[in-house]
Image (cartoon, coloured by chain):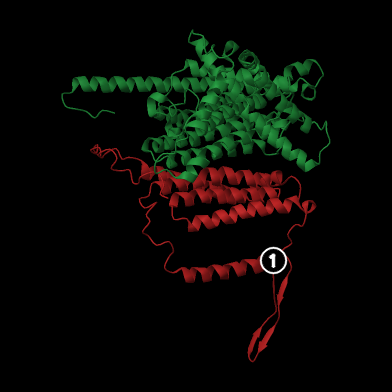
Chain colours: A red, B green
Amino acid sequence: MLQKIVFLIFSAITLGSGLLVVTQRNLIRAAFCLMAALLGVAGLFAVMEAGFLAMMQVFVYAGGIAILIIFAVMLTRRAMDPDTPQMNTQWEASVGLVLVLFILLALTLWSDPITLPEINVGRIHINEITLGGVPWPESEEDVGADTLATLGEALVDSEGYVVPFEAASVLLLVAMVGAAYIAFPSRQEPQAEPEPVGADLATEPGGEE
Amino acid sequence: MRKFLTLIGGLIYRLLPLIVFGAIAVVFLIFAVIRLEWIELPSVLRDVLAAFFAALIGALPVVLFSWAERKVLGRVHNRIGPNESGPFGIIQAMADGIKMFTKEDVTPDGADRVMFNVAPILMGSAAFAVYGVLPFAHAMIGVDLSVALLYLLAMGSVTSVAVLMAGWSSNNKYALLGAFRSVSQLISYEIPLALALLTPIMLAGTMSTVGLVEAQEVPYFLPLLVSLFLFYVSSLAETSRAPFDILEADSEIVAGFFTEYSGMKFALFFLAEYAHMFAASMMTVILFFGGYRLPLLELIVNVNFGETFLAPFIIISKSLVVVFLFLWIRSTLPRIRLDQLLALNWKFLVPLSLVNVIVVAILAKLLEDSSLGLRTIVLLAANLLMLAGAGFALAAAGRRARERDEISLTAVTDAPQLTSIH
């Protein structure tokens, strides 16, 4: 019972913040609402007894990626432009696509198998399709104990996920080296004249009501 | 009538320290009562209340440290600290609180109201939330998370976001710049902090704080000297204490990201900083000095101090010694510049922490089955070697920097044309 209440609270936080992210006109506030949505997802992980994932979500997403996004948004020029239209001009098509995606996901992840019957219309013959039927764990006893140790062992097990793990590490290394190479000031260029102070400050801080 | 009121006022004035410390003791006692189950409560209510009172304990150090800092700094500077308000100036912290309470609550023109008000709340919440996983005895803990150390790191990350929020919503260029610099310092020093936390986890096999204290047959500052150094320096930087307080120094950037805050909101930032400092010192004690136990004494006497009444006193006194070390360092060392600070992190602390993790991992695995004494001595020797290596590297870097300065000096004086000044 308490689990349901806590789940409802965290879902409300996540969905509410998500809605605020896309409807806020002020881009900075939208970025902070994104952080709130990520914290809500961390809460959902905690409700599902995945403590490690919840902490990693806060540490990596809310504490790393959200900060990056906020930095990027703060340094753009049009953070608080009130004249740009709020919605994309093609929002009807995107709503349609989102609905289709939602229906697909819902049908795939439904716990009870949904069987679509055979269709025999003239020469069209569609076989019977079964969707869903995912064996979600129903209670605490269905989840294996000590998931953190299992995760750790799977990441370094040679028959487990060690190759994707190492490949992801190499990818991150390549990204870091590339970023450092791009950002490194080349030594051959003569010293550029310093720009007047404040010319680079792209936007005024603060918010508009 | 007036004489009576004066008498009452004088009595309250004299008893105020007692009242304050009594309040602290009462909160602690309630926490103990809930956690040690001296009264029966349904388990959900017990857990929620225990976590609440544990977080409330986080609000109490400010009362002590605001005064202690001034006193310790004063004595180190060969002067008496505050001694006017109350005996030994103990009520000074309360006087500060009353002053901040009564100051005008200013919201700057054009500031984002919602974010401006939420930022100190978020920062305070992150600082108090850490107290939920700090144990005062074997069973006196807010909540015994199995990933408590990750929780600690996560709360540090939330602090960085609160700083950005505060800096941006102040509608002040200096506050924004201060916030950017503060966030760069905070996120840079999370790396040696996390890497230094890996080593006690490797030795203890658990991330839970209670588990770490219970696993310390020998306090971990002996086999993990370099980790202690790394963790302590990173904690100094994470809590923005001197010598890493370039961002709060009045002479530098007024007050950094909380320039525009006054009154109770400033008090909340202040509170959050001291709470974070006490939490960091408690974590140092838990990780490296045996927490609420006396490990070295327990090798001789066969008593587990964690389950006796002495446990809270043990951990609090050890934490107070570490807090004194924080204050001592603040009063002695000059602050270092932001670029020196970041260079220290990326060029010294991060490589050292990586080497530390590799060495401790290899040695801990090799010596898995040998006795405790052998493990401790070998790891201690390895740590001393690493420290010596780090010392030599620093000396070489210093020599190179001096030579480079000499070369550029001679170049300027010899050559007639202008060279670029760096």
Instruction: Give the image location of residue B285, x and y in percent.
Output: 65, 24
* Element marked by disc 1: loop
Q: Nearer the viewer, residue B231 or B268?
A: B268
Left or right position of B58 against B260? right
Instruction: Give the image location of residue B372, x and y in percent.
Output: 73, 23
Instruction: Give the image location of residue B287, x and y in percent.
Output: 65, 27
Q: Looking at the image, is B112 positioned above or below residue B87?
A: below
Identify the image quadrant of residue B178: top left
Left or right position of B277 against B369? left
Instruction: Determine the residue located farthest toward the left in the rendered image.
Output: B416
The amino acid at mark 1 is Trp
Q: Nearer the viewer, residue B147 or B391?
A: B147
Q: Residue at x 46, y 48 (%)?
A: A69
Q: Which residue is mark 1?
A: A110
Q: Chain under label 1?
A: A
Q: Nearer the viewer, residue B174 or B307?
A: B174
Q: Looking at the image, is B67 positioned above or below residue A123?
A: above
Q: Nearer the viewer, residue A58 or B71?
A: B71
Residue A158 seen by the camera: no
Instruction: Give the image location of residue A209, x and y in percent.
Output: 42, 50
Q: Residue at x 58, y 11 (%)?
A: B88
Q: Looking at the image, is A33 positioned above or below residue B338?
A: below
Residue B264 seen by the camera: yes
Other-residue count near label 1 (Cα within 10 Å), few / some / many at <14 / 14–19 / ≥20: some
Instruction: Determine the residue located farthest toward the top in the rendered image.
Output: B78
Identify the image quadrant of residue B375: top right
